[in-house]
Image: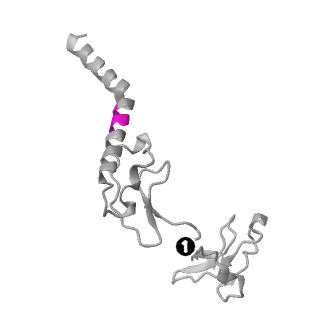
Amino acid sequence: QPRWFKQQQGSQSNVARNQPHIIMVKSLVLALAAATLALPGLPANAVILDQIPRPPMCFDITCADITCLEPFKLRRKEGHCCPICWATDEDVGLDRHSALAKPSPHRTGTHPAAPTTCAGAVCFKPSCTKGWTVGHVNGRCCAGCLPR
């Protein structure tokens, strides 16, 4: 093999061998950059992005620039590459579909051919468009719209 080929192979293995160090240095630089942004007058959610180290698979990802409405706060959770708008269950009421606990004209039981594992399932009455008809697909709990 030519000498230049061996050198090129060696330089590639050095890059591969140093990849974890490169990622660590990039993470440190990003953390320091985020810390310098923590100046008085900035919103509280401006610097929470790099408090948790980003996973290695995220180093090459560019995240969207998002703004959260109250009560949501910009947060990057552990294991996530990008921040999300997040609020606790106490801050945002959960919709448990309690409206269907009362009798509803839109609610129906499971299809007669539904498997026994569908006991307790809540189904909606299908409203099929032209060219479709109410029917059942084997293995499903509820009736649905099938092509005629």
Q: Amino acid at mark 1?
A: Val
Q: Which residue is mark 1?
A: 92
Q: Is residue 43 above or below residue 29?
A: below
Q: Nearer the viewer, residue 139 or 117?
A: 117
Name the residue located 46 percent from the left edge and 68 percent from the top edge. Answer: 72
Left or right? Give the position of 145 relative to 113.
Answer: left
Residue 60 appears in the rendering: no
Q: Secondary structure at mark 1?
A: loop
Res 101 → quadrant? bottom right
Tell me where the magenta segment starts and ends, as one range.
22-26
**Is residue 138 found left or right of 31 in the rendered image?**
right
**Left or right: residue 3 compared with residue 70:** left
Residue at 36%, 67% in the rendered image: 67
- Which residue lies at the image location 67% right of the left edge and 73% below the top edge? 142
What secondary structure is the magenta-colored segment mainly?
helix
Relative to 41, say whether 129 is above or below. Answer: below
- Picture residue at 29% right of the left edge, 19% below the top: 9
The one nearer the camera, 123 or 113, is 123
Place of residue 48 in the rendered image (x, y in percent of width and height, measured from the top left): 41, 55
Q: Position of residue 125 (x, y in %)?
A: 64, 82
Does 29 sit above or below residue 75? above
What is the quadrant of residue 24 in the picture? Answer: top left
The quadrant of the picture occupied by the N terminus is top left
Q: How did the renderer colour the structure?
A: one colour
Q: Position of residue 147 (x, y in %)?
A: 55, 75
